[in-house]
Image: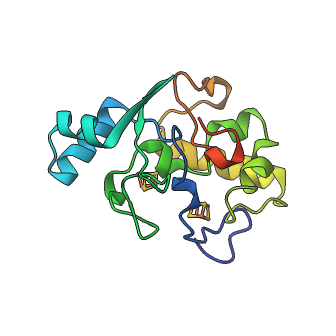
Amino acid sequence: MSHEDPVFDCKQCGECCVGFGGTYVSKEDILAIAAFTGMSEDTLRETCCQISANGPVLAVNGENRCVFQKQNICSIHPVKPRMCREWPFIPAVLRQPGNWRLMGDACPGIMKDALPEAVYARTLAELKKTRPGFIPEKATAPADAPDKIPLHSGQKG
Ligand code: SF4
Ligand code: SF4
């Protein structure tokens, strides 16, 4: 991201990959990660996923970090789950603009004082890229399309 970006400037701190239960994986995510890593789907599910209340999530290691994070870098970047690709431009920001500031407590790249209109417009534009045909009025509940919000912000999921 450019330093000119008025909304978000990732600091590459890796903090968004901390905490159990935040990164839901779909069947498509699992197949893509399996193909990328060379693991079988079963092995991936057994060794790199855990079950949360809303379905499978990426597992965390002994340091409470995603098992795919290596030295603060995502080792599966080309195929990381949609939730990771979207962060921080997630439907929860459209549903409740105040989430932007809350998320900013955990993610230093988020400009908490950015104009709400700019945050909304940018989030909508980014979601239209990651979710073709995305309609903001139908921004779904977490059970259907969970949003990635870091656990240490107290609201991941
Ligand atoms: S927590 Fe925010 S600033 Fe840090 S790596 Fe993740 S997205 Fe970037
Ligand atoms: S898949 Fe990559 S971006 Fe997503 S939580 Fe794991 S290390 Fe972070």
Q: Nearer the viewer, residue 56 or 93?
A: 56
Q: How is the image coloured?
A: rainbow
Residue at (20, 53) in percent of width and height: 37
Could you say where residue 19 lies in the image, as x and y percent from the top left?
55, 47
Quarter placement of the C terminus: top right
Q: Nearer the viewer, residue 82 or 17?
A: 17
Residue at (31, 43) in percent of width and height: 48
Could you say where residue 13 lies in the image, as x and y percent from the top left?
57, 69
Residue at the outermost bottom position? 3
Decide: is 27 above or below 6.
above
Seen in the image, is 57 located left or right of residue 17?
Answer: left
Q: Quadrant of ligand 1?
A: bottom right
Seen in the image, is 32 located left or right of residue 113?
Answer: left
Numbered label tally:
0
Q: Nearer the viewer, residue 136 or 22?
A: 22
Residue at the outermost front position? 62
Residue at (74, 52) in percent of width and height: 119
Quarter placement of the N terminus: bottom right
Q: Quadrant of residue 74?
A: bottom left
Could you say where residue 38 lies in the image, as x and y percent from the top left?
14, 51
Q: Quadrant of residue 9?
A: bottom right
Could you say where residue 30 lies in the image, as x and y percent from the top left?
29, 38
